[in-house]
Image (cartoon, rainbow, N blue to C red):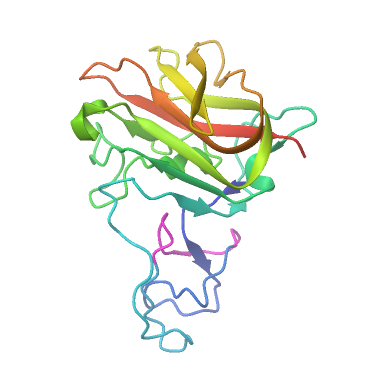
Amino acid sequence: MYPSRVGCLKTKLSYDGGDCCECTCESAWNDDYTCSSEHGIFNCKDPNASCFGEETTGSDDFSTDDQPMSYEFVPWEETEALPTVDGAVEVGTKTEVGVSSTAHDVRPGDDGCGEVGGLGCTAANTRDGIFSEIESRWSCATKLVDDEGPCQIEFTFAEPQTIVDIQVAFWKGNERTRTLEVYINGEMTHTHESYADATFNTLGVTATDVSTVMLESVALLSDEWISLIEVLIFVTP
């Protein structure tokens, strides 16, 4: 179960003349009409909706990543199965998960992360269950961060959890090595150097009563990027 990259989907019988309305938005994958955005932005233009005329909700300012966003988990079909851990479940199936980062790549085109005007490679892409599309990733470089600080991505749980494993898929993992420091509840507990013989790297993290997990880049050069395709956090059922 993984979260949608769009804010909502309209039913085939619903209004299709404008942006989503928060009061009529539905989370389903078996329709043809998508609407809203990764950040749950609603600009209601359906005159039949009860919330028609209300102010736009959400925000389309994706130049900074300082506010965590929460995502509801929905099924996603992949050509390859996501990893599982015996006796554990992915944290998103148990509690709401917020995700934020210090910065992300917004450049369009071949060197960047999508179309002009798009959201780019945001932190939310690490929680969408998709690891076969290169644009479905979080990408960051220190030059994007204030004072060229480290790239950080943080996951916040609505309820504390017991972690039994964290697995991370690194983009270009077979071409380059990246090092992450792992912070649990604000305290650095592990350092992990990526390895190339598996799509997902196991970080070797176990911890109890966890509310936040933060991954921080280590020693990135000015021209280097770190890109995470997916972050799976396994907890006790």
User: In the rendering, at what x and y percent does residue 185 appear?
Assistant: 53, 34
Which residue sits at x=32%, y=49%? 119
The answer to whether 33 appears left or right of 72 in the picture is: left
Would you say residue 1 is visible in this rendering? no
Decide which of 32, 83 is in the foreground and name it.
83
Q: Is residue 69 magenta?
A: no
Q: Is residue 38 magenta?
A: yes
Residue 25, x across and y down, in percent: 52, 71
Q: Main secondary structure of the magenta part?
A: loop
Numbered disc total: 0
What is the quadrant of residue 89 in the picture? top right
Magenta part of the chain: 28-41
Left or right: 78 as drawn, with respect to 147: right
Residue in front for this viewpoint, 219 or 85: 219
| Residue located at (43% from left, 76% from top) | 16
Residue at the spot 21% in from the left edge and 27% down from the top edge: 148
